[in-house]
Image: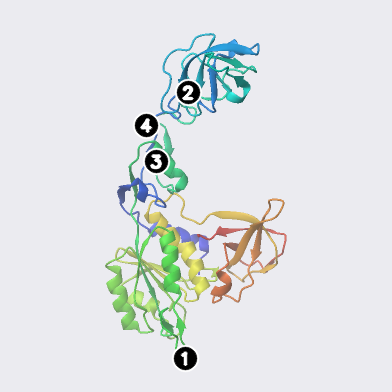
Amino acid sequence: MIPIGQAIQIVLQQTPKLASEEIALPDALNRILAEDIVADTDLPPFDRAQMDGYAVRAADVVNTPAQLRIVGESAAGAGWHHEMNSGEAVRIMTGAPVPTGADAVQQVELTREPNGAGTVEILEAVETGRSIVKQASEIKSGETVLRAGEDINAQTIATLASFGYAQVKVGKRPRVAVMATGSELVDVNEKPGRDQIRDSNNYTIEAYAKLAGATVKRLPLAGDDRDELKHQMEAAVDDCDVLVTSGGVSMGIYDFTKTAFKDLGAEIFFERVALRPGKPTVFGRIGKTLIFGLPGNPVSVAVTFNLFVRAALRAMQGASETSLPRFAAVLTRDVKGSQGRESYVPAILRTDEDGTLLADPLKWGGSSDFVSFARATALINIPADAKKVVAGSIVSGCRLPA
């Protein structure tokens, strides 16, 4: 039985990075960059007005009201490209280029323009630089604005578009095959018979794998039959980058998953982790395909997937950050620990009226209680050998993907 941190490190060490591919910008959302993004222009590309008003020389409006002659208009996309002299003003709109010679913009509310006079009264003085965003103050041409390994989200899409990346190089999506084992399982569209339950693990793993950027193929349910398991596994590993199974990894007489892995010549890197829930987690490789044997209980599946499988899938795509986002919060209720194992306890994160982040542990019935787990937004990490962590303590943990 190895510590969680060591298990994650082994997963990352054994996970190959997939090739990259070039895709259209509209398809890049939630993918992982495989190239640095470099600015091909200054931002802003010119001195830009921050508001509607008049471009002026600050020295001309020290004493107010000051009357200036209007010599032009600068609008967004249609600037006034002449030199403005002393005693002159240019009507200007938000986002428009500030003309040469001007060094400030006075907002329109502090001006008065007599109808048809061709002049404007500046009612209050304005200091040099007011309401102007200087050229290249945000970014200079040639600077790196995003790095390979970063996630492409709705915010970064604007950056890519602004610098002309109509095609974006991203990490290829890992191909994941998912297989649930156990003779007690029936598919979701079937009514369970006596001693049977519907399969939920395949769907849970598929959902989490897609959130991690993978494409997923769900395999038929496999009963507790060693030869059937071997047959399905052998067919799957030839057509995927990662095979994820659930169930059959404990010590029972019908737990054949590990045996089937080994029969197929798998190199096993670990098969027990000091984790609650999820101790009997298997990680290995058959040929070039990574294999994960997760426990059968639904909450154990969710925890072990997000700690181990997710890390591998993101590493395959070249992600610079492979783990779930971490947090520190105030515990609102006592939580028991586990002898010799770290615990990951389902919780709901919320913020109180003072802005303090709180972690409410869920009242759940163990690793099979998927109904309670459905409300979880985070996992609280309880250190190994901590008998109890009391309410009011600061706890750390990770946020679940959504």
Judging by the rendered image, the residue that carries numbered circle 1 is 194
Relative image position of residue 364 (x, y in whole percent): 61, 73
Residue 383 seen in the figure: no
Judging by the rendered image, the residue that carries numbered circle 3 is 160
Q: Are the residues flagged by discs 1 and 4 in contact, CB closer than 8 Å?
A: no
Judging by the rendered image, the residue that carries numbered circle 4 is 40
Q: Element at badge 1?
A: loop
Relative image position of residue 278 (x, y in whole percent): 51, 71
Within 10 angstroms of label 2, few (less than 14), some, or many (20 or more) residues? Answer: many
Q: Between marks 2 and 1, how big is the CA–CA gap?
A: 75 Å
Q: Is residue 129 above or below residue 264?
A: above
Mark 2 or 3, closer to the camera: 2
Between disc 2 and disc 4, whose residue precedes? 4
Amino acid under label 4? Asp
Between disc 1 and disc 3, whose residue precedes? 3
Q: Residue at x 70, y 59 (%)?
A: 393
Judging by the rendered image, the residue that carries numbered circle 2 is 47
Q: How is the image coloured?
A: rainbow
Q: Element at badge 2?
A: loop
Residue 110 seen in the figure: yes
Between disc 2 and disc 3, whose residue precedes? 2
Q: Are the residues flagged by discs 1 and 3 in contact, CB closer than 8 Å?
A: no
Amino acid under label 2? Asp
Between disc 1 and disc 4, whose residue precedes? 4
Side of 79 relative to 57 (left or right): left
Q: Quadrant of residue 180?
A: bottom left
Within 10 angstroms of label 4, few (less than 14), some, or many (20 or more) residues? Answer: some
